[in-house]
Image (spheres, helix red, strand yellow):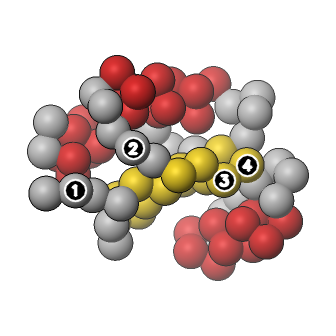
């Protein structure tokens, strides 16, 4: 079963890089939005979470604020 994974990140965020490395290591396809340069996606992220911290990761309808590897494994069935 394929999951839709989206990450809202910035280029200088260490945890954003760790999350993307995790996705790549596990063959997880994802869509990335750079909220440092994309104002519309930044607003979308803030509307969804009420805050500006990154990464924000959405797996289908579940939203994770921050890099929580255990929760990602659970949601992705890894």
Alpha carbons under labels 1 and 4: distance apart:
23 Å
Quadrant of the image occupied by residue 73: top left
Q: Relative to 40, does residue 11 appear above or below in the rendering?
A: above
Q: 73 above or below 61?
A: above
Q: Give the CA distance from mark 3 to mark 4.
A: 4 Å
Query: Could you classify mark 4 by the number of other residues whose Cα lies within 10 Å: few (under 14), some (14-19), or many (20 or more)?
Result: some
Secondary structure, mark 1, is loop
In 3D space, how far apart are the residues under numbered discs 1 and 3 (Cα atoms)? 20 Å
Q: Earlier in the sequence, mark 1 or mark 3?
A: 1
The reply to whether callout 1 and callout 4 are in contact (CB within 8 Å) is: no
Q: Which residue is mark 3?
A: 33
| Label 3, label 2: how far apart the Cα atoms are | 14 Å
Frontmost of labels 3 and 2 is 2
* Residue beneath disc 2: 29
Mark 4 highlights which residue? 34
Q: Is residue 2 left or right of residue 58?
A: left
Residue sitting at 56 percent across and 69 percent down?
Answer: 49
Q: Quadrant of the N terminus?
A: bottom left
Classify mark 3: residues with Cα within 10 Å, few (<14), some (14-19) or many (20+): some
Q: CA distance from mark 2 to mark 4?
A: 16 Å
Q: Identify the disc placed on residue 2.
A: 1
Check if mark 3's residue and mark 4's residue have beta carbons within 8 Å: yes
Side (left or right) of 33 relative to 18: right
- Indicate which disc, 1 or 2, sits on the residue closer to the N terminus: 1
């Amino acid at each position: 079963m394929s999951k839709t994974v989206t990450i809202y990140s910035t280029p200088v965020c260490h945890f954003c890089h760790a999350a993307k490395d995790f996705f790549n290591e596990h063959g997880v396809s994802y869509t990335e939005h750079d909220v440092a340069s994309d104002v519309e996606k930044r607003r979308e992220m803030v509307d969804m979470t009420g805050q500006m911290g990154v990464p924000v990761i959405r797996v289908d309808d579940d939203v994770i604020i921050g890099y929580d590897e255990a929760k990602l494994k659970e949601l992705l069935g890894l």
